[in-house]
Amino acid sequence: MSIDLALILTRARHPLRALKAHTVLHRAEEDPKRVVRAEIRFAIEGAVPKPRHPRDRAVARQVLLCLAVTRQDIELIVTFELSQAATA
């Protein structure tokens, strides 16, 4: 999923300097202890513009959800952190 996001940003000609992904999986309390929720936080560094319109955020989320191959019963939470790093 991270490589897909990096590819989308570079194809959109945004100068991406770094991309980090942090994933936390939550399992069911009882057997079978399957994954019930996945939290993915992307930290994006570079001159990537923030979504200016709610539709932009919805499209970005929809693209990521389409890229994720998950079961319908797993809650997927995706968050983004953008930082405009100073270029040296």
Image: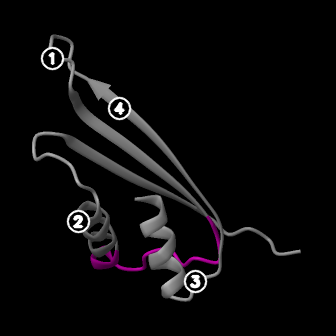
Tell me the crowding category of disc 4: few under 14, some 14 to 19, or many 20 or more residues within 10 angstroms, Cα based.
Answer: few
Q: Which amino acid does label 3 sit on?
A: His
Q: Please state which of the two labelled residues, at mark 1 or mark 3, is closer to the viewer.
A: 1
In the image, taking residue 4 as reference, residue 43 lies left or right, namely right
Q: Give the secondary structure at mark 1.
A: loop
Q: Do the residues bearing badges 1 and 3 touch, measured as CB atoms within 8 Å? A: no
In the image, taking residue 73 as reference, residue 3 lies left or right, namely right
The x and y percentages for residue 79 are: 41, 53
Q: Which of marks 2 and 1 precedes in the sequence?
A: 1
Residue at mark 4:
25
Q: Which of marks 3 and 2 precedes in the sequence?
A: 3
Residue at 35% from the left image edge and 52% from the top image edge: 78
Q: Give the secondary structure at mark 4.
A: strand
User: Magenta stretch: residue 34 in it?
Assistant: no
Q: Give the secondary structure at mark 2.
A: helix
Residue at 21% from the left image edge and 18% from the top image edge: 33
Which residue is farthest right? 88
Q: Which mark, residue 14?
A: 3
Q: Nearer the viewer, residue 64 or 51?
A: 64
Residue at mark 2:
66
How far is mark 1 from mark 4, CA to CA? 15 Å
Q: What residue type is labelled 2?
A: Cys
Q: Do the residues bearing badges 1 and 2 touch, measured as CB atoms within 8 Å? A: no
